[in-house]
Image (cartoon, rainbow, N blue to C red):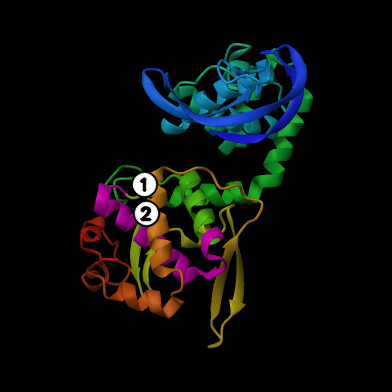
Amino acid sequence: MKELKKVKMFCSICEEMHEVSLMEQTKEIIVKGEPIKYREVYYKCDKYLDNNIFMSEDLWNMNLINSLDEYRKKKDLLTSKEIKEIREKYQLTQSEMAYLLNLGEITITRYETKQIQDASVDNMIRELNDNPLFALKMLEKNKSKFKRYDEIDKNIKDVIDKNIIVFLNEQELIAKYIKYNKKSIVNGNTILDIETLTNVLGYITKEIGPTKKVVLMKLLWYIDSLSYKGHDYSITGLVYEHMPYGALPIGHREIIELSSIKSSLFINESEYEEYRIQFNEKYKIKRMKKEEKRIIDKVIHKFKNYKSYEISDYMHKEKAYIETKDNQIIPFTYAKEINEF
């Protein structure tokens, strides 16, 4: 347990106004049959040695939400905060978001407080976040339920206008992966997930700082290959081709335009065009699975200080490169034989 600060308030233990300690501790409870550890915050009356802990209603609610959100994270579900952020993105009330998704009126209120959504609803909320055209379609479908229809229609269209270039770029990338929409040795048994890829790109560039496109593309290949080597699945679902500077993912031009990074074209010392990639400070890095983060960190640690020609030379020595030909897709069978880090 740890003391956060002193707070002057009415103490429900001794029923007096005085300073109490605001404390935190890690606590374990059972949620849906599973043990969950979470951060619990409470007050402690320093006048008593025993039976000296109490909570306000606000603290009790916050602790409940914290425990449920830890379960959500474990199950890869949106947290209550993330659901609220998606709702506020479209300037919706809780009941309006429920109407939009054709749910019961108080369903979103429950999800933002004391109830865990199931996977099907979670997927629908993610679709709402990722695809404003889906939001527009659902608004039209449930039009009769909205008193603020015109205002909400404008809000959604404003989101579309603001993100249209990003959205169209993502759709172009998705189109290039239509033929790879089944798990196979080509995509590392992972179907491309734009959100995951965007987050991985953001995390890499935030950790290593501005880098060249050549380096970033190789880091992606090593991350996916190392994941496949250990777990028989890649992280991003990208498909890589044998190119002069090493492995290059299909859709690489669209990849460097994803929202978590910024790309700029410059002329290098050899008078060739190159892209420099850096983290987009407006992007918020999302949580990752611990094992995936460990793999990404391991690759970053290995290649963080490599120059573009150094990482290309390193990749050229991989069996995956030696035994494939120009423009050939590099199957993930070779991931099992990548050089040891």
Q: Which mark is residue 92?
A: none
* Residue for point 41% across, 46% down: 192
Tell me the quarter of the image containing the C terminus.
bottom left
Using the image as rendered, state which of residue 309 and residue 246 is in the foreground: 309
* Residue for point 58% across, 48% down: 168
Q: Mark 1 points at which residue?
A: 291
The stretch in magenta equals 206-233
Assign a secondary structure to mark 1. helix
Q: Do the residues labelled 2 and 1 touch (CB within 8 Å)?
A: yes
Task: Indicate left or right for 148 with 228 as reference.
Answer: right
Using the image as rendered, state which of residue 80 and residue 276 is in the foreground: 80
**Callout 2 amino acid:** Ile
Task: Indicate left or right for 318 with 18 as reference.
Answer: left
Q: Quadrant of residue 104?
A: top right
Q: Mark 2 points at which residue?
A: 295
Question: Crowding at label 1, few (<14), some or many (≥20) Cα neighbours within 10 Å?
Answer: few
* Residue for point 38% across, 62% down: 299
75 to 117, vertically: above or below: below
Q: Does the magenta stretch include residue 159?
A: no
